[in-house]
Amino acid sequence: MKAALVITAVALSVVSIQSADAKGCIKGAVVGGVAGHYAGHHGVLGAAAGCVVGRHEANKRERHQERSTTGQSVQSR
């Protein structure tokens, strides 16, 4: 339980410093931290990986939305 609180505090401090670049990171870090904790007490590693995945998904969603609003065709990769 202590680790979850530490992860949350670190994630919130990172977001407060870089709020413009944190899209998806908080949600991913929380989910990854919990999953990592229950998968073998690796909450910090799970939070870091969750943050990366969350940012990737948020960026992908943003690119898709930009293409949709400008009228360009969306190509799946």
Image (cartoon, helix red, strand yellow):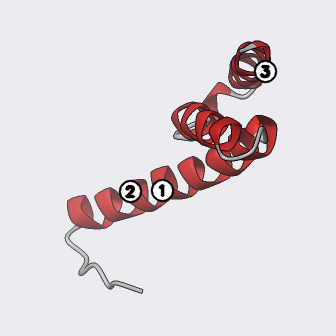
Please state, as top left, top right, bottom left or bottom right, where the C terminus lies in the image.
Answer: bottom left
57 to the left or right of 9? left
- 64 lies left or right of 12: left
Mark 1 touches mark 2? (CB < 8 Å): yes
Helix or strand or loop: what does disc 3 sit on?
helix
**Label annotation for residue 57:** 1
Q: Quadrant of the N terminus?
A: top right
Relative depth, front residue between 32 and 10: 32
Q: Is residue 28 left or right of residue 37?
A: left
Residue type, numbered disc 2: Arg
Whether 66 is drawn above or below 12: the answer is: below
User: Residue visible at 19% across and 70% down?
Assistant: 71
State which quadrant residue 64 falls in.
bottom left
> Which residue sits at x=70%, y=20%?
4
Query: Quick one: 8 or 37, which is closer to the camera?
Result: 37
Residue 61, disc? 2
Name the residue type under label 3: Ala
| Crowding near the residue tagged with mark 3, few <14, some 14–19, many ≥20 C-alpha atoms within 10 Å | some
Residue indicated by mark 3: 3
Disc 3 to disc 2, how far (Cα)? 30 Å
